[in-house]
Amino acid sequence: MATYTLIEPSPRRSRFKTALWIALGLIALFVFITSEVLLITDYPMYHAYRLQVIADRHLLIPHVLFGGIALLSGPVQFSSRVRQLHPKFHRVLGRIYILSVFLSAPTAVILSTGRPGFPGTSMQALAWVVCTAAALITARNRQIAQHRQWMVRSYAVTFTFISSRVLNLWPRYWSHLGDSFAAVGVIAFTLASLLIADLGLNWYELTTKRRTS
């Protein structure tokens, strides 16, 4: 039987990861309550959107289902403990994540076709697929460090489906989601997420001065 040596991350890094996942979880919970629960209860401001969701349900259900799988599998995929102690499970869940992205992204584009948000959604879906495909290719080539970086970028785009809804309860923000502002907003959230992800990936290099002999 193969044995694995568990390499514990530094306490500081471990605390940061824990705080990050808690923050993302709280944001997701907030969005779930303010966007999804209020949508189900037919919140007056969401009424027209609710009718649109009902009309789009045949495509929306698979989009949300596979997008939700990608969103929820992220914390497990980034767990160092799971990755080291259960590598087979990590690989299987990784394949499920990739398949979910490849199925959810096209449905998002189809749903937005002919609507003001189409350019933004298309750009978001393209970034999602490209980052995920790069993660898949680097994994198959056993370029593990690069694979993790691309997975971080991929999940950053995944989370834009949550972060872009944080301001939904603000009437002024919501009133513009039916026009071209929707596309601009999605593009901005996607680019900001990728930028933040890359800053995180390169934080050590950005904050550490190289020693000269």
Image: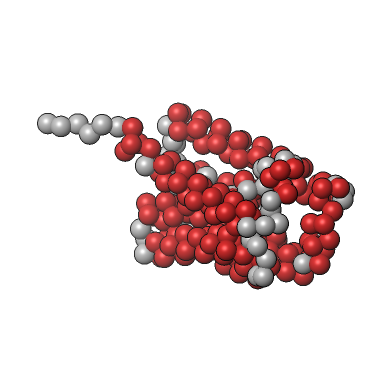
Residue shown at the point (36%, 64%) measured from the top left: 141
Q: Is residue 125 left or right of residue 84?
A: right
Res. 182 in view: yes
* Whole-percent x, y for residue 72 in the image: 64, 51
Residue shown at the point (44%, 36%) measured from the top left: 8
Residue 55: which quarter of the image? bottom right
Residue shown at the point (57%, 63%) measured from the top left: 119
Q: Furthest-left residue in view?
A: 213
Res. 108 in view: no
* Whole-percent x, y for residue 128 in the image: 53, 60
Residue shown at the point (56%, 32%) measured from the top left: 19
Q: Is residue 174 left or right of residue 40?
A: left
* Whole-percent x, y for residue 16 in the image: 50, 32
Q: How is the image coloured?
A: secondary structure
Q: Quadrant of the C terminus?
A: top left
Please state which of residues 79 and 154 is positioned toward the viewer in this rendering: 154
Against 155, is 59 above or below? below
Please state which of residues 169 and 132 is positioned toward the viewer in this rendering: 169
Q: Is residue 209 left or right of residue 5?
A: left
Against 146, is 62 above or below? below
Against 69, is 82 above or below? above
Q: Is residue 148 left or right of residue 96?
A: left
Q: How many marks?
A: 0
* Whole-percent x, y for residue 65 in the image: 70, 61
